[in-house]
Image: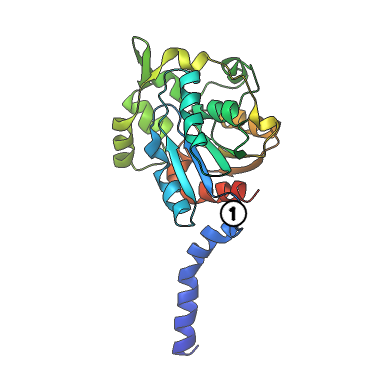
Amino acid sequence: MNRRKLIGAAAAGAALPLLNRVASAQTSPKTKNVVFVHGLFADGSCWSRVIARLQQKGVNCTSVQNPLTSLHEASEAARRVIAAQPSPTVLVGHSFSGMIVTDVGVDPKVTALVYVAARAPDAGEDYTALAKNYPTPPATAGIVFNDDWGQLSEEAFLHDFAGDLPREEARVLYAAQQPFKKSLTTEKTTNAAWRTKPAFYAVSTQDRTINPDLERFMAKRMGAKTIEIEASHLALISHPDAITNLILEALAV
């Protein structure tokens, strides 16, 4: 192989990882707005890596600051953000915020729903009872309550919540986690938006916060376009390209 061909082959090889990352994201989005909602043990900044990638593609992104006090107040916070969007919007939720996506996703402005290792109950369904059909994930034992407010212990956060992130990064996220009100986890949704809206689901196969088989059950029940990622509960941070591409598919609906 001559020098010119050798350089060309090397350049092509170097480009392959980038091409592979974006190969499934070439569809031009019809919807230009995404609203993100975070779950327990986190805040709105947990979506930063996905937001950065979508912004590079011209997508308008807004991350709701979930108060983690009650489902009603959390849903109202999401509704305010959705109402402020200039046009149709894709609603994305992680973990507990799948409850919010399920409840407020019936908004006419919402065109599709994306669940990332998230709860996806039916209307009025007792999610806690549903989850008991599967082995209890390890993170549950790591929740520590101070009166009515709970959060994960550092050990549970690092090992069971953010297990595939570098320890130094996970410790920073642990320091920023927001406490949640105990009663929040027992509330029920009024709506099941996934019954009428296109749904997309990312299952985390190494999840120790929500049982992966429960995630698969919820995704199958809603008829969601489903991907599986070898990730902890925080696939949105450890695998932002895969989550970004799934959202781009929802934007193209």
- Whether 188 is drawn above or below 246: the answer is above
User: In the image, is 135 to the left or to the right of 182?
Assistant: right
Q: Secondary structure at mark 1?
A: loop
x and y, in percent, of residue 204 in the image: 54, 38
Which residue is found at the position 59% from the left and 60% from the top? 26
x and y, in percent, of residue 23 in the image: 57, 61
Of all residues shown, which one is farthest toward the bottom?
A: 2
- Check disc 1 and report the residue beneath it: 29
Quarter of the figure with residue 125: top right
Front-lying residue, 67 or 149: 67
Residue 215 seen in the figure: yes
Of all residues shown, which one is farthest toward the top?
A: 147
Which residue is found at the position 32% from the left and 27% from the top? 154
Front-lying residue, 106 or 42: 106
Residue 205 seen in the figure: no
Front-lying residue, 85 or 183: 85
x and y, in percent, of residue 157 in the image: 37, 29
